[in-house]
Image (tube, rainbow, N blue to C red):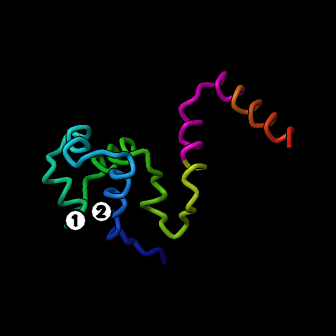
Amino acid sequence: MVHNDLDKLGDIIKAARKHKNLTRDQLAERVGITSRYLMAIENENHKPSYNLLFHLVRELGISADTIFFPENIVMNTELEQLTRLLRLCDERDLKIATATVKALLDSK
C-alpha cells in the first residue's frame, strides 16, 4: 500500500523557493496567489489545489517525483537540472547535446 504523505510539501516548496533565491512575495506573484497563502502552504501544512501545485512545480523547476515519490529522491541536483534543461530543447538541440556528451565521454 502506498502511503500518501504530503506533510513535507511545504518544506519542499520552501526549500525550492529559497534555492531559486525567490522571496515569498515574488513566487506568490508569479503563480497568482497571495504571499499569505504561500506562507500557509510552506509553514501551516495547507494543501494547494492541483492547478496551483502544477504552477508551483513548474515555476520552481522541481520534479514532481520530489513530491509524489519522496522515497525515490536521488540527491543529484545537477543531473536533475540537466534533465529539466534537456526537456526544453527541440530536436536539433537534443542532437547537439547528444553529440557533445558523446565527445566528452570519448575524450576520457
Q: Is residue 64 magenta?
A: no
Residue, far top: 92
Residue lying at 79% horizontally and 37% vertically, measured from the top left: 104
Q: Is residue 67 above or below residue 80?
A: below
Residue 87 position in % (x across, y down): 56, 36
Residue 20 position in % (x across, y down): 38, 46
Q: Is residue 25 above or below residue 94?
A: below
Near mark 1 (Cα within 10 A), the count class, few <14, some 14-19 or many ≥20, is some
Which amino acid is tagged 1?
Asn
Magenta region, mostly helix, strand or loop? helix
Q: Which mark is residue 10?
A: 2
Q: Nearer the viewer, residue 26 or 53?
A: 26
Near mark 2 (Cα within 10 A), the count class, few <14, some 14-19 or many ≥20, is many
Residue 92 position in % (x across, y down): 66, 21
All told, the count of numbered labels is 2
Q: Which residue is mark 1?
A: 43
Q: Is residue 86 magenta?
A: yes
Circle 2 SS class: helix
The stretch of residues the image draws in magenta is 81-95
> Are the residues at dot 1 and dot 2 in contact (C-beta closer than 8 Å)?
yes
Q: Nearer the viewer, residue 42 or 64?
A: 42
Residue lying at 25% horizontally and 37% vertically, measured from the top left: 30
